[in-house]
Image (cartoon, coloured by chain):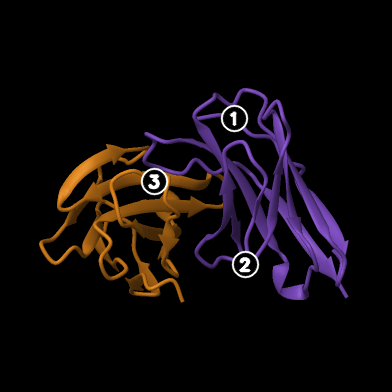
Chain colours: A purple, B orange
Amino acid sequence: DAKTTQPPSMDCAEGRAANLPCNHSTISGNEYVYWYRQIHSQGPQYIIHGLKNNETNEMASLIITEDRKSSTLILPHATLRDTAVYYCIGLSGSARQLTFGSGTQLTVLP
Amino acid sequence: DSGVTQTPKHLITATGQRVTLRCSPRSGDLSVYWYQQSLDQGLQFLIQYYNGEERAKGNILERFSAQQFPDLHSELNLSSLELGDSALYFCASTLGAISYNEQFFGPGTRLTVL
């Protein structure tokens, strides 16, 4: 699975968009980009995933660059409850386990 | 609520002891994954079972073992416990054997070894 690089921490004002970057320059053609988050020692929670195209669901949007070497997770209107560690994971279709890196600690400020 | 349940929530035990952690997957899910989260190692995959059979192994110590029962619940057995085994243990479940579907995580069991 691709190695991913994320900034260790970010702040965002409540109500503003939170843009979390992820670099995955070694990602291969069949590897998806997944995002999970973990709120203070709770079980990780799936957010979104994509392969090539941008994706949107009720939680977030995922923008993947055309060369697929990086992506951005967008939380359109961050709330205090979005404060969490966000993990970007590269995962092939045949993989079975998630490989978590250090993630980005997002703090939403009032 | 993910639909995955784990018991107990907290466990405090002494070095050298043995404990069993239990996980019930979401209704209908056949695959169970175990992860360990410690302060120094982060979240690490331990082992996966699918429909009763072991399917993938990660950084699981020989002192640890797991199994999945016919009713699909899974147990993680940790023996000869050491201080360094203190961690959060999560299980997750998916419908199929391959994890490109989202994994649903339980609330975790916090193990403290004194």
Question: Which residue is painted at 22% across and 49% down in the image?
Answer: B50
Q: Distance between the residues labelled 3 and 2?
A: 24 Å
Q: Mark 1 points at which residue?
A: A3
Identify the subunit bearing mark 2.
A
Mark 1 vs mark 3: in front? 3
Q: In this view, does A76 lie to the left or right of A26?
A: right
Question: Which residue is painted at 80% across and 68% down in the image?
Answer: A77
**Which mark is on residue B99?**
3
Please tell me whether residue A14 is drawn above or below residue A63 in the rendered image.
below
Whole-percent x and y of residue A73? 72, 50
Q: Is residue B92 left or right of residue B66?
A: right
Identify the subunit bearing mark 1.
A
Please tell me whether residue A4 is drawn above or below residue A38 in the rendered image.
above
Q: Mark 2 points at which residue?
A: A40
Residue type at tag 1: Lys
Question: Which residue is painted at 21% across and 65% down in the image?
Answer: B73
Whole-percent x and y of residue A26? 62, 23
The quadrant holding residue B109 is bottom left
Structural crowding at the residue carrying mark 2, measured as other residues with C-alpha within 10 Å and reported as few (<14), some (14–19) or many (≥20): few
Please tell me whether residue B56 is drawn above or below residue A42 in the rendered image.
above
Are callouts 2 and 1 both on one chain? yes
Q: How far apart are marks 1 and 3 (CA)?
A: 17 Å
* Disc 1, SS: loop
Q: In this view, does A37 lie to the left or right of B104?
A: right
Residue type at tag 3: Ser
Identify the subunit bearing mark 3.
B
